[in-house]
Amino acid sequence: MNFFKTGIKSVLGSADNDQAPTAPETVEKLVDRLLHSVLLDDRRDACKALRALSREYRVEVGAQGMTAIIQILRNDYQDSEIVSYSLDTLCNVVTCEEYENECDRSQISASIGEQFTEMFIKVPENVGLIMDCLETYDFKVRRGAIHLLTMLISNRTRDLQNIILVNPLGISKLMDLLKDSREAIRNDALLLLIQLTNSNTNIQKIVTFENAYDKIFQIIHDEGRSDGGIIVEDCLILLLNLLKNNSSNQQFFKEGSYIQKLAEMFVFSLTADSWTPQKVSNVHCMLQVVRTLVSPNNQQIMICACQNVMRQSKLLNSLCIILMSSGIPADILTETINTIGEVIRANIENQNDFDMVVAPSMPPRPALVVLLMTMINEKQLLSLRCAVLYCVQCYLYRNDYGKKTVIQTLLPSSTLDNLRLSTGQLLCTGLFSSNALANWFSAVALMHTLVDNIKQKEELLRVLLASPNGSKPMTLLDQCTTLLQQEGCKLQSKLGIIMLLSTWLAYCPVAVKAFISSEGTMAFIIAQISANEHGEEEYLVQGSCAFLMGLCIQFNDNTIPSQTSKDICQLIGKRIGQETFCCKITEVSHHKAYVKACKEMYIRVKSSSDVFLDYEYCKLYKSLETQIIKLINNIDLNTEELSELSLTTDSILLVTQYKNIIRGLGNEIDSLKENVKLLEVKNTELENELLKLKEKNVHLSDYNTLLKAQVLSTQHVQSVQGNNLMHLNEDQNNSDSVGDANDKNTKEILLNRLADETLRAKIANDELVKLRTDQENLFMLLLDQDNKIAMYKRQIYEAGLSILEDSGTDDLRNE
């Protein structure tokens, strides 16, 4: 309160007694001075005093003074000092920050800043006043306006975005701030744009077309690229906002050759001492930008196009260099592995390039082998192991050659070198290790070699594993069932093996036959389904086992006595019950682990205990769950007849073939739809260009007609002038014959008239030459325009798109 005792006289004038006014009284008098004082100096002093009070007495200043401050911004905008005071005061009022010296903090709502923000933006013109302040070059005014807008957007993001979106040239004013030579202004503008572009597609597009990419990359270059400071990170965060889930901005980024500029940023020092905390943050953001362009959530045609550019620009090569280097921070290595996975996913050229990457070790090892060694190593970070599995999944996705290569390393007849053999050996080592998480990772990785690949499922049945006691080798399938039945088999190990077996058996009667032939397997599965254990994890195992048993019914070729589909169904009816069996299956699809795994291919877990199901397994489960339930419910156990939903071997293979055909056609249809969209856009552009050319052609035709009329008029003038010259000559002859009869003055008049007519005749001649030249140029221009119109019509016609019918269209069809 010392302010009121010592400064009240200077601000409000002398007081009649020594008692200091209260805060509300002081604010009221200052606001009254702002509203009614005639002198600018008085208003300026009052505004400065309100700014000083706005931190300690925010509620009083905001409640009483907001209207007066807005009036100052509207009327006194030419005085930079009072405007800066006003902006600072508003910043103090609307901020969500709590001030240490704020009075009665316990009684002030935490959302007081949001409430004042709502009061301020009720009149959209108030935001326009702040936007107008950005045009002032004064440092304090411009920076204060940026700070105030940033706070307003932070408090009421959606409302401010809508207001700025409809403000004329509003976004253009903000983008111009990035060109301010004062770094403080530019840096604050970056933070403002990050807030503004968050989750608003329309604003993202406008910002992009305001040449945002060039400005961002220029700032990044000036700041030192990956080795720069926090400004580089801010630029990359803004870039992420513009690209994420925005297909048009991604298209513009690709077509503008900005991926090449992004690739240049990945050429940097990889020494261990060069990884400062800020560089780690910068590179992490750079990797996120790459992933945004090739995210599986994007349109497939856009993903493929970006992947190809990343290969051609050596970006993929740079990522592989980082992957194979030593001394890379763990989080950067993890994100690099994730990024490489999405860059190569479903792109056979990129997958082949990755297949050729070799680690600089002795002996040299393929990158895939190095990754698998990391995945099964229980000492590695969980996030790193999950990233490796994701990368392996992406490498195998729609990569029949890669799947075949991995399977062949397990076959006894394999002729590949030891380096190739280690791929399959590492998967088996992890599958049968004592670490449950290694079991799960290896089972899922091996499972992905079998997705949509019946031939490799049959090939995998040939794999033999040596027994530890030197007895007869066991098949991989028998070894998996034996491990599943072991006492002490942990939850993750069980789920991993069940997922592998389920994918193996689906659509493969040969694998089903081998599975049900394994001794004790069906009895174990029945026991698991019938278990009385309770808990979400136990329900997950029971339902997954029920699904596995359902696959044995649906894809059974009925060639094994006492193990036909009918026999298994009777066993279910006697030991479990149809209703209970179906309930066990449906419980899995309602489990939170299933719901989470269905959302995305990448595994996001906080601890190893959260690792349960895989994305591809959930897809398989979802596609067959209903069929299995219908199959079980349509069984009449009294007549011992099976529904026609049970598939024969031939029908299974036929269905699989049709599914692959439909999948391929679906991808082709999506690609064609994208091409049609692009062609429609191009067609619209061509039609607009054609209309412009037609309008120009009409204009030129009218101009040609006018020139022709001018030529005819000029020719008429020439003939008239010729007649005049002839008459002048006759008059001259007559004047000579008369001789002395005409006086000297008459001769001079006639001679002057003759000179004028001669000069005038010379000037039509010049105009006639000029008109003829213009006419010839016009004819050439019309010919060029006709050729362009014909070319555009031909392009539209060849693209198979509709155009406006005219005589030219018939000519194209005839051709």
Image (tube, grey):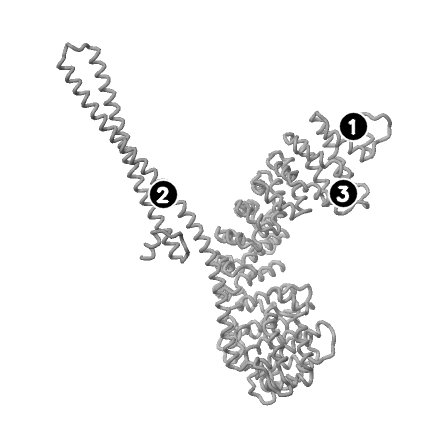
Residue 308 position (above or below residue 454): above
Q: Quadrant of residue 542?
A: bottom right
Q: What element carries label 1?
A: helix
Residue 368 visible in the current orientation: yes
Other residues around mark 3 within 10 Å, as few (<14) / some (14–19) / many (≥20): few
Q: Nearer the viewer, mark 2 or mark 1?
A: 2
Tell me residue 323's x, y (percent). 56, 61
Residue type (three-letter) at the residue carrying disc 3: Tyr
Q: Is mark 2 on a helix, strand or loop?
A: helix
Q: Which mark is residue 697?
A: 2
Q: Quadrant of residue 564?
A: bottom right
Between 74 and 608, the one lying in front of the other is 74
Residue type (three-letter) at the residue carrying disc 2: Asn
Q: Which of marks 2 and 3 is in front?
A: 2
Q: Which mark is residue 12?
A: 1
Residue 451 position (above or below residue 784): below
Q: Residue 99 carries which label?
A: 3
Q: Which residue is at 21% across, 12% downward?
A: 746
Tell me residue 212's x, y (percent). 54, 46
Q: Is mark 3 on a helix, strand or loop?
A: loop
Side (left or right) of 714 relative to 257: left
